[in-house]
Image: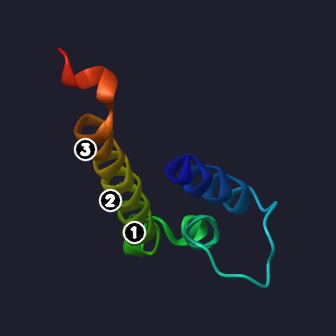
Amino acid sequence: MTATAILIESALAFLGLGDPKVMSWGFMIGSGREFLRTAWWLCAIPGIAILLTVLGINLVGEGLNDTFNPKLRNL
């Protein structure tokens, strides 16, 4: 749920539908789009941050589900 919220917020900010007063990873990627050929890291670093954050949250959630879900203990 949290990872999905991060992805949705980033996508909306990338499209320019977010709050322009608040800095977000999607806004950073959208702003760096025009400098992609000369300064690729302006888009790459926030993109990698989104990737690692969402992947980490999903892995922690799956680990907690595997540990504490009683339906999976019998398998």
Marks 1 and 3 in Cβ contact (< 8 Å) = no
Quick one: label 1 or label 3, which is nearer the N terminus? 1
- Comparing 21 with 33, the one in front is 21
Report helix, strand or loop for mark 3: helix
Quick one: label 2 or label 1, which is nearer the N terminus? 1
Q: CA distance from mark 2 to mark 1?
A: 18 Å
- The answer to whether 68 is drawn above or below residue 18 in the figure is above
Q: CA distance from mark 3 to mark 2?
A: 16 Å
Residue wearing tag 3 = 63
Residue at image point 38% right, 54% down: 57
Q: Position of residue 53 (x, y in %)?
A: 38, 61
User: Tag on residue 40?
Assistant: 1
Q: Residues within 10 Å of mark 1 (few under 14, many from 20)?
A: some
Q: Is residue 40 left or right of residue 72?
A: right
Residue at image point 45% right, 75% down: 42
Marks 2 and 1 in Cβ contact (< 8 Å) = no
Report helix, strand or loop for mark 1: loop
Check disc 2 and give the amino acid type: Leu
Check disc 1 and give the amino acid type: Trp
**Location of residue 68 (image quadrant):** top left
Q: Position of residue 19 (x, y in %)?
A: 81, 73
Residue at image point 60% right, 64% down: 26
Please say which color scheme the image uses.
Answer: rainbow
- Comparing 14 with 39, the one in front is 14
Report helix, strand or loop for mark 2: helix
Q: Is residue 75 left or right of residue 30?
A: left
Q: Position of residue 12 (x, y in %)?
A: 72, 55
Q: Position of residue 29 (x, y in %)?
A: 55, 66
- Comparing 58 with 42, the one in front is 58
Residue wearing tag 2 = 52
Q: Residues within 10 Å of mark 3 (few under 14, many from 20)?
A: few
Quick one: label 3 or label 2, which is nearer the N terminus? 2
